[in-house]
Image: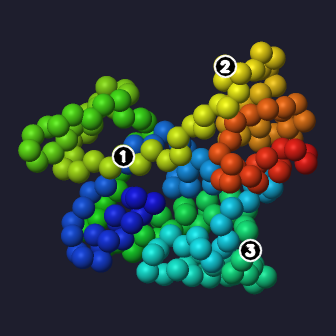
């Protein structure tokens, strides 16, 4: 969302900007929580409160209703649906930005950021390349959850997982085997539900 907001705001003001994104994910803009393919993973906030734009509070709700007229203001939609909305919003912002805005996407991670001078930064990528920038934004997404069983569990850990977003937990065959995992309480409630009811 940081890149989407930046592209939109600079386009509105007519400010020329070149955005460079470093992201090793193959899909764009939705983030780990909204990349899940499981239909049982629901948002923990209703559709009426999930707009990408603060000045257009009904944007997500209207987008969702164009796809499904039965969606209500207090409907809790699937997380991957919101991911599609974020991705579409990102590409729409780029398309509407005009010629003064450009974006460059690298499928890699940054290893270090160093002050270049009083006017900029040097970002060192994992592959060794460096990118020079006037401004750097660290948009790291959700941090990995803390394992509440660490140092307190003496049993077998073969059937536990540190995070519910691991790909093997997305497969139905793996769900029956999961016994314990750490998760953020509200944000991942729908994942608990999907795992334990499968």
Task: Evaluate whether residue 59 shows in this view.
Answer: yes
Mark positioned earlier in the residue sequence (3 or 1) = 3
Residue at position x 43%, y 36% in the image: 108
Pointer 1 local density, CA inside 10 Å: few below 14, some 14–19, many at least 20? few
In the rendered image, the vertical position of residue 86 relative to residue 109, given as above or below: below
Q: Position of residue 41 (x, y in %)?
A: 75, 55
Under circle 1, the secondary element is loop
Question: Residue 195's image quarter?
Answer: top right
Mark positioned earlier in the residue sequence (2 or 3) = 3
Q: Do residues under tags 1 and 2 come within 8 Å of each other at their CB atoms?
A: no
Q: Pointer 2: what residue?
A: 151
Q: Pointer 1: what residue?
A: 138
Q: Position of residue 101 (x, y in %)?
A: 29, 65
Mark positioned earlier in the residue sequence (1 or 2) = 1
Q: Nearer the viewer, mark 1 or mark 2?
A: 2
**Left or right of residue 189: residue 53:** left
Q: Position of residue 16 (x, y in %)?
A: 21, 66
139 or 22: nearer the viewer: 139
Q: Do residues under tags 3 and 1 come within 8 Å of each other at their CB atoms?
A: no
Under circle 3, the secondary element is loop
Mark 2 → mark 3, Cα distance in angstroms: 40 Å
Residue at position x 68%, y 41% in the image: 183
Pointer 3 local density, CA inside 10 Å: few below 14, some 14–19, many at least 20? some
Mark 3 → mark 1, Cα distance in angstroms: 32 Å
């Amino acid at each position: 969302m940081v890149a989407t907001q930046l592209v939109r705001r600079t386009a509105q003001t007519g400010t020329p900007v070149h955005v460079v994104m470093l992201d090793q994910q193959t899909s764009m803009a939705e983030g780990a929580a909204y990349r899940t393919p499981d239909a049982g993973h629901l948002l923990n906030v209703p559709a009426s409160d999930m707009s990408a734009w603060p000045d257009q509070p009904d944007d997500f709700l209207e987008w969702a209703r164009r796809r499904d007229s039965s969606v209500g203001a207090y409907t809790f939609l699937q997380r991957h649906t919101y991911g599609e909305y974020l991705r579409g919003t990102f590409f729409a912002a780029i398309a509407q930005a005009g010629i003064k805005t450009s974006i460059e996407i690298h499928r890699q991670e940054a290893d270090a950021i160093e002050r270049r001078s009083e006017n900029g930064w040097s970002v060192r990528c994992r592959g060794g390349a460096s990118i020079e920038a006037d401004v750097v934004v660290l948009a790291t997404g959700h941090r990995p959850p803390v394992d509440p069983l660490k140092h307190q569990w003496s049993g077998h850990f073969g059937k536990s997982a540190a995070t519910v977003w691991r790909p093997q937990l997305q497969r139905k065959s793996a769900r029956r085997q999961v016994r314990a995992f750490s998760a953020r309480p509200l944000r991942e409630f729908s994942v608990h539900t999907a795992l334990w009811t499968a």
